[in-house]
Image: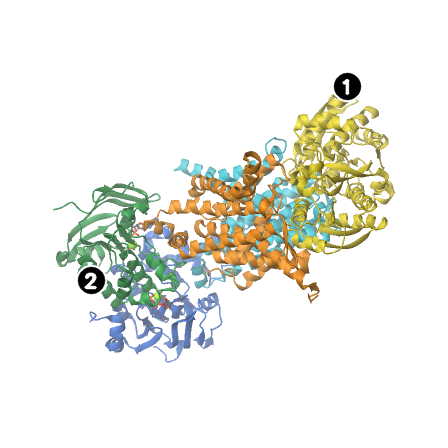
Chain colours: A blue, B green, C orange, D yellow, E cyan
């Protein structure tokens, strides 16, 4: 199923912050239809890579292509419109909107219902079915009418995933989707990701190695801003350098 | 048994109108490490915030060495020797890493020195002059923990300290907690990762829907696996 | 005589010097504003009124109590600072945690009250205030005639600016201040008495404004209107410098003062809007202001 | 029925809390009351009532109040009308409603020029008179080389332009001018330019706080000590007092009235002082005079109907404490003598309000535009 | 009639503060600017009053585009400061350009005949026209707020970064709202010029921006009817207090302070809250 052509490729991207090189000359290519993990110790530059790929940061050097198109110079909103959508490491919801509205905001964008200021917002109710479906998928149905602030941390993360999915993106970038989730939710979200991965490409950052092992076709390990290893989970986890820099001694 | 260091009785707490804690009871003795388990939204964070006094709408009793904390303004609670590592970390953007680290005033003798902390977390040493929030997520977590170690607080409240950390670092933090315990520090830990928690915890409390549903010593963890399964969905 | 763009060089130096003097006022005022904004997230609209109050207190001290300039330099900021503390305790402190716009609206209301009341009592034509004996007269610098009093203003405000900057950027107290801007609750949870810190900061900011007022009294007419015109310019200065940036406020104050002075020579008609034009340009290029940190 | 509604109601509409409150303000209301008392409290047997309002310098507030006064409160005439936007707006409304208004608090010559009204009168100073007084008369007093500090808006330009005209007409020279923005705090840059211009008179074509600040800073830069004279084109007694003689000494300015000019003036000033705690300036006395004259006109016309009263106002000479041999032109302009004053040195002043010495008298016919030159449609 | 003009102005302002969360401290620019455009078009060019008012609204929209372009780069307090400074700049320009006639203002604007038919010198006709314009504007605000577009505005106010990551071109939405608000403020300003028959500097000065904030705050930010109530209250108060001994500015200041401290929800907001409590 996975074709050989990369859907997203980054060539030699580098990010410097006032002299500090957070990401150095990273070349990454993600094949269409795969679930790809980006792992690495804290501060390795994973989020920074994400930020560059989604244009929240502009790389100091290097080139990024998405579906054969050079997106190095685009704005973040444009990238999202091309179907490359991200979630945030530190949770990002619309706090005073209800869960349902949060998801609807995302659904509204591709539906061309976004800029119509002359129509009643009742027209948005046609998005409700789809929204509720997504909310159910992340197990938030009981809270659909609660404002997002009132959700606990873990549920906010779940909501964020639902919102991201609502855009029906070609490719998703998930920054630590499991962080702060309880065990049952981890299972559920894993299932969800597995389900949505069909026909999509996913790049995720995750520290929960069970999840990585379970879900990902391919793993890239980043350390100190550079690629340390790249391959299947088994290959990578066997690499002694990876064990030392990232997994530690206890992980079997 | 001696009087507990921290004693929480029939604690109720509200966010605005919504009633979140329903009569929480909790005891922690000097030198103990106690872990709160519970699924998302059970009220773990809320319990810590209520003890600290960040959440002001509370009823019941919270006593530290017999002294009532409920009536104290927030800063007095910290000065009484309670350190807090918040869930959202709370690193300050306008301060450098080092300033962040040295920000909390010392409340008692016996805290770690800055050098000790740097040797514990070399990442922080390397990035000490950069802006606090420019650290990676995990580095921020280290900084948040490191910050209270300096103050000499004898009781620290830790909210999910391993969230988002690489396995190596989680291990290191586990080692740190063990070391702190040896120094006689009292720790109240909120944790999802109970593989990690079992290494350090003397006692577990199990929370559900704003109530304490059970409590048992650390070594009995295996015996309570079924119940955990039930409550946490492990 | 050498000329630059058709203006004799000495005249130009004169203008630069004068710009520096104006800049001193901008710097002092925007410094206070930046300090208050930095910590309380309140745009202190009453700042102009507090500046005016400083001048009037000095006037009052002289005319009703016979207290002269030098003691006023300390007393007036103190008095205004104390009133500001009262305002903070009774009103501003209730607004923390709400949208910062409410702070702006509250202080806007206070500014209206102060100015309205002073206009009612003192009329609009203002009151006389003479410079202290020691500082009257002028120096002949060769290229210009510099009133000694103005020289003193530059020196005094530079010293105050520098002192305040050091206090905030280089001390623990300053670190508390900066941290409390971001998350006051957390700083308090570390054991810092944040409410008191906030109160003192507001007092300090207002006192800085009042100090500028006393310094201004011998130069500008002591009038209820003196603050309201200045305050908008000072806001622009703060925006250009980067809100909440102490150093930014100071440096921008001086730079814009000089720039305005030069505009008065080359194209006087534009001198009132030059600061706003600069502001627009800066925002286009650097939305956070020259010294501001990107949010 | 001679008097509508059996009462003559006069509205004093001015700025009582804003920037121009010192020009007239509440004290003007007192001056109007004095006029009513001096007239005897009744006209044609009907009581006289003074109402007043603070227009806060907002033409829309002024216009709403005026409308309400005319429509529901049966006010017969409105007086004072500080600041030109308000005066023009209310005069426009009065014209539409066919009511009399007498302006003492605004300076624009448009009131009796392009926007004149058959029922509108301009009673005290205007920009033309100020220009003639300060510009013309000062040249004859030796101030023949001028440099202007001009507020950068229409009011400033017209003051500068007209003053220059008279300076030149009397054989003086204008060496240059610099325009400063309205509400400038610091005048030192401009003063330095004026200082080095070689002029012997620095004309201040601005108003209010701008003028005060310029004068104060001029003394600081030693401009007057250096032999240059300052001439303020629009400045009043209250403002001189606000500056203090130390800063204001030597300043020349034109006003239409000063309390220490005659026994009559001194007596009036004392009465006014007792009631308000301050000395009257030309606007207070102007308002007094306009109210008094209006009442006299009603008396003469035998009714308070607008047309006959306006006619009487146009015809009657003005003879009171404010104006001697004053006359009203067909465009509504009241013509009377203006004076050029110089501010005394602190050591010359004998009392708190002893501030001016008179330099020259400017006959009314010179001071004010002729009706035919005013551009008023009514006179063509 | 003046209440209707100011009420519309306040509604336009409320569109920004109440629904996008942007406090503009320079809205007088659009209100007063439009008044000048309308007054000039009607008086000097002899335009039909309706055309004049529309020109005012369009001119205000154009000004809104320029100001908005600069200001929307920042949020919250920064935004307020920038709009304030730009507004001040505009006021300076109005003082200096010849067509505004400086401090005299454009005076004696003829009301004329609406579309050549309706004589606006007739007070009742003028009143109904003003009412119609107000209702139109009020409806427009209501429509915008409760539209899909309004929904996105709320989301942006909540979390701008997230909205960007969902693919919204946030600046365009904000600019759009800003221009709409400016145009409606312009509609109010243009109408005012016809109603009062003059356009003066008071309408472009920052005190006017302060006044509209007061009206909105007093009536209730983010409530539809609030600004209308607030405008009516403030205008009435201003006229009523004019004949009082007490200085008006002081009283307005006091109202400001009291509102912020105790009735943050404003008159309409508090009333609705009271109703809600009773029905509970
Ligand atoms: N804006 C910035 N300015 C300066 N340094 C930065 C900035 N953003 C990130 N860094 C630094 O770059 C490095 C990489 O950060 P990044 O957030 O990408 O790490 P990460 O791999 O996502 O780590 P984690 O797993 O802890 O989230 C860190 O050392 C961080 O301090
Ligand atoms: N700011 C808030 N306002 C209203 N309700 C809140 C707020 N924060 C949390 N809650 C509610 O309080 C309850 C307890 O939340 P709390 O954050 O204590 O859970 P937790 O056990 O820490 O969960 P997690 O593991 O997800 O962090 C939840 O139902 C949540 O929805
Ligand atoms: Mg990261
Ligand atoms: Mg929690």
Dividing the image into 4 quarters, which one contains the C terminus of chain B? bottom left
The quadrant holding residue E65 is: bottom right
Say which mark, if any, is on residue B195.
2
Q: Residue at x 78, y 32 (%)?
A: D261
Element class at badge 2: helix
Percent x, y for residue E75? 49, 55
Residue C224 picture quarter: top right
Q: Residue at x 35, y 46 (%)?
A: C193
Q: Is residue A9 visible?
A: yes
Query: Which chain contains the residue that carries disc 1?
Result: D
Determine the CA span between mark 1 and mark 2.
105 Å
For residue C166, above or below residue A190: above
Query: In the figure, B106 relative to E219: above or below?
Result: below
Q: Taking B48 as reference, is D3 above or below it?
A: above
* Image x and y of residue D155, in percent: 73, 47
Q: On the image, numbered disc 1 is attached to which residue?
A: D45
How far across and how far down the image is residue D270, in percent?
71, 26
């Amino acid at each position: 199923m996975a074709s050989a052509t990369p859907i997203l490729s980054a060539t030699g991207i580098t990010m410097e912050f006032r002299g500090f090189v957070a990401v150095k000359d990273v070349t990454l290519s993600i094949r269409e239809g795969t679930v790809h993990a980006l792992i690495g110790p804290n501060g390795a530059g994973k989020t920074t890579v994400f930020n560059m790929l989604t244009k929240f940061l502009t790389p100091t050097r290097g080139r990024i292509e998405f579906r054969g198109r050079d997106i190095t110079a685009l704005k973040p909103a444009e990238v999202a419109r091309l179907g490359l959508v991200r979630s945030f490491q530190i949770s990002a919801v619309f706090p005073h909107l209800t869960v349902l509205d949060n998801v609807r905001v995302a659904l509204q964008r591709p539906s061309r219902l976004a800029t119509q200021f002359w129509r009643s917002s009742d027209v948005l109710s046609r998005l409700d079915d789809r929204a509720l479906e997504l909310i159910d998928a992340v197990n938030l149905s009981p809270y659909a009418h609660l404002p997002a602030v009132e959700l606990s941390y873990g549920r906010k993360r779940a909501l964020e995933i639902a919102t991201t999915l609502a855009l029906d993106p070609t490719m998703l970038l998930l920054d630590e989707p499991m962080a702060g989730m309880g065990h049952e939710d981890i299972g559920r979200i894993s299932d969800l990701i597995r389900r949505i991965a069909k026909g999509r490409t996913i790049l995720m950052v995750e520290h929960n190695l069970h999840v990585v092992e379970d879900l990902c076709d391919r793993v890239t390990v980043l350390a100190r801003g550079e690629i340390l290893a790249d391959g299947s989970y088994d290959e990578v986890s066997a690499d002694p350098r990876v064990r030392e820099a990232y997994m530690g001694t206890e992980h079997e | 048994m001696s009087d507990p260091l921290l004693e929480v009785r029939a604690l109720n707490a509200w966010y605005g109108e919504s009633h979140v804690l329903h009569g929480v009871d909790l005891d922690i003795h000097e030198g103990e490490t106690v872990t709160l388990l519970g699924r998302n939204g059970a009220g773990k964070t809320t319990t810590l915030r209520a003890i600290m006094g960040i959440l002001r709408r509370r009823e019941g009793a919270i006593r530290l060495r017999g002294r009532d904390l409920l009536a104290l303004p927030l800063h007095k609670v910290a000065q009484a020797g309670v350190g807090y590592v918040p869930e959202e970390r709370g690193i300050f953007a306008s301060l450098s890493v080092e300033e962040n680290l040295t920000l909390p005033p010392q409340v008692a003798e016996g805290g770690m020195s800055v050098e000790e902390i740097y040797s514990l977390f070399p990442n922080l040493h390397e990035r000490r002059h950069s802006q606090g929030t420019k650290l990676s997520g995990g580095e921020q977590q280290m900084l948040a923990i490191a910050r209270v170690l300096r103050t000499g607080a004898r009781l620290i409240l830790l909210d999910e300290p391993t969230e988002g950390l690489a396995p190596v670092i989680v291990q290191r933090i586990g080692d740190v907690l063990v070391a702190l315990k040896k120094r006689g520090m009292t720790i109240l830990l909120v944790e999802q990762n109970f593989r990690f928690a079992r290494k350090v915890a003397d006692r577990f409390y199990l929370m559900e829907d704003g109530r304490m549903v059970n409590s048992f010593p650390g070594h009995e963890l295996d015996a309570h696996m079924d119940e955990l399964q039930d409550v946490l969905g492990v | 005589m050498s000329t630059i763009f058709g203006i004799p060089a000495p005249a130009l130096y004169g203008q630069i010097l004068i710009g520096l003097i104006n800049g001193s006022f901008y710097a002092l005022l925007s410094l206070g504003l930046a300090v208050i904004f930095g910590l309380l997230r309140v745009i202190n609209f009453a700042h102009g009124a507090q500046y005016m109050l400083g001048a009037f207190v000095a006037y009052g001290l002289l005319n009703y109590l016979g207290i002269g300039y030098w003691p006023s330099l300390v007393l007036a900021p103190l008095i205004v600072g104390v009133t500001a503390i009262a305002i903070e305790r009774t009103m501003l402190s209730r607004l923390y945690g709400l949208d910062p716009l409410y702070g702006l609206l509250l202080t806007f209301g206070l500014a209206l009250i102060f100015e309205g009341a002073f206009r009612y009592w003192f009329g609009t034509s203002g009151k006389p205030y003479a410079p202290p004996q020691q500082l009257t007269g002028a120096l002949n610098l060769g290229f210009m005639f510099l009133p000694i009093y103005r020289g003193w203003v530059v020196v005094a405000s530079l010293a105050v600016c520098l002192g305040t900057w050091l206090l905030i950027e280089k001390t623990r107290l300053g670190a508390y201040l900066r941290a409390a801007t971001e998350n006051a609750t957390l700083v308090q949870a570390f054991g810092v008495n944040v409410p008191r810190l906030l109160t003192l900061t507001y007092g300090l900011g207002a006192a800085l404004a009042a100090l500028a007022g006393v310094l201004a009294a011998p130069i500008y007419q002591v009038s209820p209107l003196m603050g309201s015109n200045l305050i908008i310019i000072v806001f622009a200065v703060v925006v250009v410098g980067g809100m909440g940036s102490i150093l930014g406020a100071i440096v921008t104050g001086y730079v814009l003062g000089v720039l305005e002075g030069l505009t008065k020579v080359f194209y006087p008609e534009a001198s009132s809007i030059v600061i706003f034009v600069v502001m627009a340009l800066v925002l286009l290029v650097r939305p956070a202001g020259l010294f501001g940190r990107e949010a | 029925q001679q008097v509508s509604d059996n009462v003559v109601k006069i509205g004093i509409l001015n700025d009582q809390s804003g920037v121009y409150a010192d020009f007239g303000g509440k004290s003007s209301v007192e001056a109007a009351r004095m006029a009513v008392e001096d007239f005897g409290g009744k006209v044609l047997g009907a009581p006289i009532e003074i109402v007043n309002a603070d227009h806060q310098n907002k033409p829309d507030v002024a216009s709403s109040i005026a409308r309400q006064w005319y429509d529901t409160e049966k006010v017969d005439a409105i007086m004072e009308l500080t600041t030109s936007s308000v005066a023009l707006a209310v005069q426009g409304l009065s014209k539409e409603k066919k009511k009399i208004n007498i302006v003492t608090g605004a300076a624009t010559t448009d009131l009796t020029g392009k926007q004149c009204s058959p029922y509108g009168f301009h009673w005290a100073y205007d920009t033309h008179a100020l220009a003639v007084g300060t510009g013309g008369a000062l040249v004859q007093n030796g101030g023949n080389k001028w440099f202007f500090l001009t507020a950068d808006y229409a009011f400033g330009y017209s003051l500068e332009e007209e003053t220059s005209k008279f300076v030149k007409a009397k054989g003086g020279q204008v060496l240059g001018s610099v325009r400063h923005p309205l509400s400038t705090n610091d005048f030192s840059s401009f003063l330095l330019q004026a200082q080095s211009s070689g002029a012997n008179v620095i004309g201040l074509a601005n108003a209010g706080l701008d003028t005060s600040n310029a004068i104060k800073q001029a003394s600081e830069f030693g401009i007057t000590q250096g032999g240059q004279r300052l001439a303020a084109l629009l400045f009043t007694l209250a403002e001189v007092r606000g500056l203090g003689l130390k800063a204001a000494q030597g300043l020349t300015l034109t006003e239409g009235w000063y309390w220490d000019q005659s026994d009559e003036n001194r007596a009036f000033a004392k009465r006014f002082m007792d009631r308000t705690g301050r000395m009257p300036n030309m606007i207070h006395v102007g308002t007094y005079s306009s109210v008094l004259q209006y009442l006299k006109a009603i008396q003469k016309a035998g009714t308070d109907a607008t047309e006959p009263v306006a006619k009487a106002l146009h015809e009657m000479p003005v003879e009171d404490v404010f104006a001697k041999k004053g006359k009203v032109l067909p465009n509504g302009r009241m013509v009377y003598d203006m004076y050029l004053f110089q501010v005394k040195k602190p050591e010359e002043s004998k009392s708190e309000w002893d501030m001016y010495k008179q330099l020259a008298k400017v006959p009314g016919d010179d001071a004010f535009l002729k009706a035919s030159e005013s551009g008023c449609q009514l006179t063509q | 009639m003046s209440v209707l003009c100011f009420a519309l102005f306040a509604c336009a302002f409320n569109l920004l503060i109440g629904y996008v969360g942007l406090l503009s401290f320079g809205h007088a620019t659009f209100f007063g600017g439009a008044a000048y455009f309308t007054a000039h078009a009607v008086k000097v060019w002899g335009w039909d009053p309706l055309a004049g008012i529309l020109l005012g609204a369009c001119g205000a929209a154009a000004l809104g585009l320029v100001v908005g372009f600069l200001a929307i780069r920042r949020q919250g307090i920064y935004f307020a400061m920038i709009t304030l400074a730009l507004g001040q700049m505009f006021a300076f320009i109005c003082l200096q350009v010849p067509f505004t006639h400086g401090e005299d203002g454009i005076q004696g604007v003829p009301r004329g005949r609406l579309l050549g038919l309706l004589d606006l010198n007739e007070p009742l006709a003028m009143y109904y026209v003003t009412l119609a314009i107000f209702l139109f504007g009020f409806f427009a605000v209501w429509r915008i707020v409760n539209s899909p577009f309004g929904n996105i505005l709320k989301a942006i106010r909540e979390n701008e970064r997230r909205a960007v990551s969902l693919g919204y071109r946030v600046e365009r939405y904000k600019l759009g709202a800003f221009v709409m608000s400016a145009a409606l403020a312009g509609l109010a300003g243009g109408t005012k010029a016809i109603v009062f028959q003059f356009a003066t500097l008071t309408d472009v000065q920052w005190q006017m921006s302060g006044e509209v904030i007061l009206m909105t705050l007093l009536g209730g930010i983010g409530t539809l009817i609030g600004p209308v109530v607030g405008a009516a209250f403030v205008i009435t108060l201003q006229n009523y207090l004019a004949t009082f001994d007490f200085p008006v500015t002081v009283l307005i200041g006091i109202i400001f302070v009291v509102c912020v401290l105790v009735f943050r929800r404003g008159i309409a907001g508090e009333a609705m809250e009271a109703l809600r409590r009773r029905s509970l």
